[in-house]
Image: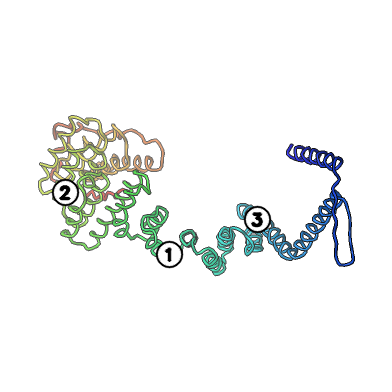
């Protein structure tokens, strides 16, 4: 459209000039020395126009010839950039396909001509690491930093990530330490530091980092809670290594109130106290914990504690029967406490009730030991066999038939004549939950 308008304007101007020349052709006289040139005005104007066009073309031709080397270099550079872009695309595809050697070769072929050399060198470093060439990996990362100094953070994060993948934990920790000086709150730096502290067991450092992780929302709330519990467990583990009750108690008191109410931590602390022989403290700890929150695991451990006042311990446990009359774990704990209090008939009744409510290998074993101690060998053997079958996954048989009156839960008439027999030694160590 624009060309059409210009063409129409030129035609109009030509017509106008033709009409003007037709009315008055004009006259031009040029005298130089003995030479005189006469011509019409129209001819002179036409010659000037032709001369201007020729001069313009000559200047354009000279300029193009003069700039030819530069334009050639520009064309070559543009072609190199296009080749570099194709090589980068091909290398990234090969990297995603697991063709490490070919990917490394293509990524480096035109890296010097690439508009994004950082991508070339970082991807080449990944390809080199997959081939186990750590020296080449570090060399490519160095080139990436030299070519793009402003991308120090990206290069450092890639270096730390690759070191972490190769389990070079100390090197990765050093790299992340340098990055944290540059960007103390960078989420990726904090997340990788958390992982290294976990894998190396540096729970003190993780404890210092955890508030920052929570504040910056680097990890979900659920993961933060799990880390806190794991951290608290590690503090108790370290305190227990000392073998001193004072340090263990100090570590327990240093925990937040919410942590001291956690069932897993209570069991762990109670287990460590039990190893130190602090049975009375364990009994008091578990009693408070169970009264605050019912837990079969806590009840099971309470039934294995030998408090100073066995009768009172048994009395506390029997009060829980009102709300949990058919709990097999509670009944098993009561049976064990009755054995410690030399109440053989009651112990037998509770153990049988526990098996009736929910058979367990532990209840069969304890009942078998009790029956063996009071001389009922065949019934004890049947209990042991039933416990083994249950532990192996088979359906256990019913309780063996026992001659004579069975003991009652609220009395001790069943086999009271056996009270002169020493109580069987039942030692069951509860494993702390991880």
Quarter holding residue 22: top right
Mark 3: few, some, or many residues within 10 Å (few <14, many ≥20)?
many
Please give the label number shown on residue 306.
Answer: 2
Q: Which residue is mark 1?
A: 175
Q: Nearer the viewer, residue 3 or 256?
A: 3
Percent x, y of residue 421: 16, 46
- N-terminal of the pair, mark 1 or mark 3, is 3
Percent x, y of residue 114: 62, 60
Q: CA distance from mark 3 to mark 2?
A: 76 Å
Q: Which residue is mark 3?
A: 85
How many tags in the picture? 3
On-image quarter of the N terminus: top right
Percent x, y of residue 301: 23, 45
Q: Nearer the viewer, residue 360 or 211?
A: 211
Q: Residue 59 vs residue 409: left or right? A: right
Residue at 85% over, 59% down: 30
Q: Residue 408 vs residue 118: left or right? A: left
Q: Nearer the viewer, residue 236 or 337?
A: 236
Of badges 1 and 3, the one in the foreground is 3
Q: Secondary structure at mark 3?
A: helix
């Amino acid at each position: 459209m624009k060309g059409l308008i210009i063409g129409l304007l030129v035609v109009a101007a030509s017509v106008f000039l033709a009409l003007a020349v037709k009315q008055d052709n004009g006259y031009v006289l040029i005298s130089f020395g003995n030479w005189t040139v006469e011509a019409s005005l129209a001819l002179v104007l036409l010659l000037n126009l032709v001369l201007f066009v020729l001069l313009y073309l000559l200047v354009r031709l000279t300029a193009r010839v003069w700039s030819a080397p530069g334009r050639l270099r520009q064309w070559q550079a543009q072609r190199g950039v296009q080749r570099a872009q194709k090589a980068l695309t091909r290398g990234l595809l090969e990297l995603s396909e697991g063709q490490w050697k070919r990917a490394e070769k293509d990524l480096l072929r035109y890296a010097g001509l690439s508009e994004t050399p950082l991508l070339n060198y970082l991807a080449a470093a990944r390809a080199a690491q997959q081939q186990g060439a750590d020296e080449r990996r570090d060399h490519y990362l160095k080139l990436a930093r030299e070519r793009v100094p402003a991308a120090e953070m990206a290069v450092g994060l890639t270096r730390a990530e690759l070191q972490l993948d190769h389990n070079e934990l100390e090197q990765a920790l050093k790299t992340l330490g340098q990055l944290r000086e540059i960007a103390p709150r960078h989420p990726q730096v904090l997340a990788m530091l958390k992982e290294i502290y976990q894998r190396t067991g540096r729970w003190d450092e993780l404890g210092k980092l955890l508030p920052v992780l929570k504040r910056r929302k680097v990890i979900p709330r659920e993961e933060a809670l799990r880390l806190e519990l794991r951290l608290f467990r590690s503090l108790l583990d370290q305190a227990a290594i000392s073998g001193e009750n004072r340090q263990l108690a100090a570590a327990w008191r240093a925990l937040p109130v919410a942590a001291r109410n956690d069932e897993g931590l209570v069991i762990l602390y109670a287990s460590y106290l039990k190893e130190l022989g602090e049975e009375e403290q364990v009994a008091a700890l578990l009693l408070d914990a169970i009264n605050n929150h019912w837990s079969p695991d806590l009840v099971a451990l309470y039934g294995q504690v030998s408090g100073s006042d066995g009768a009172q311990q048994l009395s506390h446990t029997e009060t829980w029967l009102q709300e949990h009359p058919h709990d097999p774990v509670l009944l098993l704990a009561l049976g064990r406490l009755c054995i410690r209090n030399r109440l053989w008939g009651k112990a037998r009744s509770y153990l049988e009730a526990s098996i009736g409510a929910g058979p367990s290998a532990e209840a069969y074993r304890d009942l078998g030991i009790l029956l063996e101690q009071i001389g009922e060998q065949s019934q004890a053997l049947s209990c042991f066999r039933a416990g083994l079958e249950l532990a192996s996954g088979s359906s256990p048989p019913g309780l063996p038939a026992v001659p004579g009156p069975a003991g009652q839960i609220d009395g001790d008439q069943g086999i009271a004549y056996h009270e002169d027999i020493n109580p069987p030694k039942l030692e069951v160590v509860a494993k702390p939950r991880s």
